[in-house]
Image (cartoon, grey):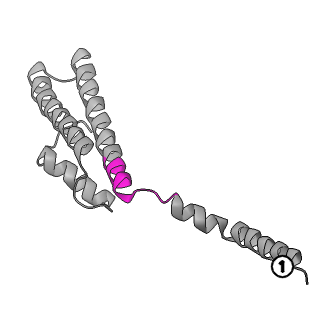
Amino acid sequence: MSIGGVVFLILLTAAVAFWVLRPVILQRWGKPNVAQDAIQKQRERVLTYYERVLSNVRDLDDDLATEKIHPEEHAQERVVWVERGVTLLALLDQLKERAITQENATDAEIDALIETNLGAPKESGIS
């Protein structure tokens, strides 16, 4: 076999090996940052809870407008939900600065973190 044939065979073998191992190589280079994923997951959970708080405030306002609840009850409930919203916005600011707790936080741990920052949830007729 000539030298040109050997070089061609080596190049062909390398190309085939690269083609076969390409998914493994690209997956390793493009591996996501676990800490950033955890922060993003936490942000999404907090934003979901914040949207729920906003919805509850809107529902309270609608109930007051349709006279389903008394103004005193509306004022008390609204203060509770607005405080929760403010706390969640503060938590979002913390998430921008750093990762909270573990890199691989589970949904239950994130929910516990939200509840810890909000304090014990108060029961209300609105969910």
Q: Which residues are magenta?
A: 30-42
Look at the image and tell me whether residue 121 can be seen. no
Q: Main secondary structure of the magenta part?
A: helix
- Determine which quarter of the picture holds residue 19: bottom right
**What residue lies at 32% left-to-right and 57% top-to-bottom?**
107
The residue nearer to you, when weighing 91 against 116, is 91
Q: Position of residue 24 (x, y in %)?
A: 60, 68
**What residue lies at 35% left-to-right and 44% top-to-bottom?**
44
21 vs 96, left or right, is right
User: In this rendering, is residue 24 above or below 110?
Assistant: below
69 vs 42, left or right, is left
The residue nearer to you, when weighing 37 against 5, is 5
Residue at the extreme right: 1
**What residue lies at 23% left-to-right and 48% top-to-bottom?**
98
User: In this rendering, is residue 114 above or below 29?
Assistant: above
- Under tag 1, what secondary structure? helix
The residue nearer to you, when weighing 16 against 117, is 16
**What residue lies at 16% left-to-right and 38% top-to-bottom?**
87
Q: Position of residue 126 (x, y in %)?
A: 24, 36
* Residue denoted by label 1: 6
The kind of residue on which mark 1 rests is Val
In which quadrant will I find the N terminus?
bottom right
